Structure formats: C-alpha cells, structure tokens
Image: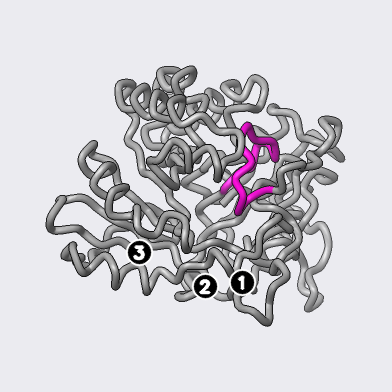
Amino acid sequence: MNSIVGTIGNGSPLVADASPMIDPFGRAVTYLRVSVTDRCDFRCTYCMAEHMTFLPKKDLLTLEELDRICCAFIAKGVRKIRLTGGEPLVRKNIMFLVRQLGKRVQAGDLDELTLTTNGSQMSRYADELYDSGVRRINVSLDTLDPDKFHAITRWGDFSKVMEGIDAAQKAGLKIKLNAVALKDFNEAEIPELLRFAHGRGMDLTVIETMPMGEVEEDRTDRYLPLSKLRADLERQFTLNDIPYKTGGPARYVEVTETGGRLGFITPLTHNFCESCNRVRLTCTGTLFMCLGQNDAADLRTALRASEDDTLVYAAIDEAITRKPKGHDFIIDRTHNRPAVARHMSVTGG
C-alpha cells in the first residue's frame, strides 16, 4: 500500500512504496553496492592509512538488518548486489547474509549477487560462496611480485591470495582481477598481469587511483592516467573496443593476442557518471548516492523506527532525489587534498 510520508524539496508529496528508483537525471538505480565492514586484513597504501581507526561494532547494522535493507532495495528494482568492504569476508558470520541474498537470486528476484575481495579468505569460503548462488567475484591484485605485493598491502600474503584464486576457480567462480594503476609502481607490470589473467581465463580491469581519505603518500605521485597506460599497452597488444558490460563503470576492449577482455575504469580522465545506475550502502546504514561526493542519507534510523518498511522506502526515495549528475574527483598539484574525507574502505570501490 502506498503511503504519503512527507514532502520532497519542491513541496511535492513523497509517496513511500516499492516503486522503481529513478534519479533526477532519468537514470534507473538497479545496482546496490553494500560495504559490510570497514575493516580489512590488508592496509593498501592508496586505500588506507597504516594505523586506521575503525568503526566501533555497536555502530554497525546487524547482518539481519543489512539483509532487510537489501531486500527493500530489491523490492524497489535493484537487480544486482555487490558485497564489498573493507574486506567483506572478514566480517563475522558474513555467510549468513550471502546465503540470505543468494535465496533472492534463486527466486529470480535478483539477477546477480557478487563480491569484491582481496582474496585472502577465498580458500576458506569459495565453495560456500558458489553453493550460495555467487557465480562471479572481483579480486583486487595490483602486482604479481610477492615483495612488492607485501609493500603495497603492508600486511598481505601473496601466496594466500594465489591459493584463494586457485580455490575460487576450482569452486566454479568466475574471476575478474582489479588492479589500481600506480605510476612508478606497477605500470610496467600491467602487460604481465594481463597475460597472467587471460592465461587463466580471467578478465582484468585497471583502475585510476581515486582521491578518497588521507593516506601517507601524495596521490599525485602515484596517479597514472589510463589514457597513457592504454597507449603504452597498444605498443605490444591490439586492443579492440567492445560493447561488453557487467553493470559497473568499466569500458572494455578485447585483446587480440590473448583473446581476453581488459577493462578501464577512469573516474579522472573519463568521467563515467553519465550512465551511473549505482548507490552505495555502508555497514552503518548510511547511503551514499555517489562515491565521489559526501552527500548521504541515514537509513538506519528509518530501519529501526518500525518493523514495517514504509519509512525505509521513504528514506530511499528521498535520497534518490538527491543523486547528483557526477562526482567531484580530481587529482593534480593544485588539488592535493582528498575529494572526500572518508577512506575507500568505508564505501567500497
């Protein structure tokens, strides 16, 4: 049943129901990314400070509450959910949420449930993820050099990630590798990463570093425009643009020499916001309508105010009216502060 629960900024009535979410620019919101924890067992230099202060557990939504909010979004037209972190698999009892959402995939209410992981816990969870309905995962991997891997993750064990990739493929999970392109760190390694990924039947996506949260290094020293990287790659590979899409912002090419796909995520050199269909929910119930802006909505209060979802629907609908046209990311010497203060681990990638 529809309920009028207030007004939006122009004075029009706000009707709370399970209707589709259309933002002010006519874009349908069908993709929800859920950061189930801000904690991680790595401390990647471009993502986190080495000595992070994490959220107290009392501020987190329970897994049951996260499931309820996800189901409200599914009712309102979300067809894809990606679980992120931090590292999602370090959240205690995370498989409860995976199994609950997996049931919605099996029922046909959700097209896909997937997750982004650093791979460190994958050998433990791969089979259960597959059994719960997950068919595809993203694994973050910036280098194949164990020493450099330890340097950039600070705490990471390269062999554990390789074991995790092996376990995931054995379980039947399709893997896409994500690599953040970093100047003077891994730019010369991208061809090797490409051959490694395609040689094992995995896609590879390269990503420009994003100005989120204070970290110890100056991101302008690490920023590598993917336009330059692509030009470098084209000296040894033939890259053909293809219309392939996974629901995210990557633009894909097919690599003639390997037969595999390579994606480019370019928030800085090519603003990808024109087709944005995503919103991001944090583990505290805060909804960010854009990764690169600070505007947010509190869904936790609405969730806990009633066992009925009317207030949750109303809070979601009001938030969607504030979804911006695009983000505020920029990296250069005159903008050496983060575009947003929160770290990437708060909302996921």
For disc 3, the marked residue is 251
| Residue furthest to the bottom | 334
As shown in the figure, which amino acid type bears the numbered disc 3?
A: Arg
In the depicted structure, whether residue 293 falls above or below residue 38:
below
- Circle 3 sits in a helix, a strand or a loop, which is it? strand
In this picture, residue 175 sits left or right of residue 113: left
In the depicted structure, whether residue 325 falls above or below residue 255:
below
In this picture, residue 241 sits left or right of residue 99: left
- The foreground one among 27 and 18 is 27
Evaluate whether residue 132 shows in this view. no
Neighbours of disc 1 within 10 Å: few (<14), some (14-19), many (20+): some
Residue positioned 60% across, 39% down in the render: 154
As shown in the figure, which amino acid type bears the numbered disc 1?
A: Phe
The magenta stretch is 33-48
In this picture, residue 101 sits left or right of residue 254: right
For disc 2, the marked residue is 268
Whether residues under marks 3 and 1 lie with C-beta atoms below 8 angstroms apart, the answer is no
First of labels 2, 1 by sequence position: 2
Residue positioned 34% across, 53% down in the render: 189
For disc 1, the marked residue is 329
First of labels 3, 1 by sequence position: 3
- The foreground one among 86 and 41 is 41
The CA distance from mark 2 to mark 1 is 6 Å
- Circle 1 sits in a helix, a strand or a loop, which is it? loop
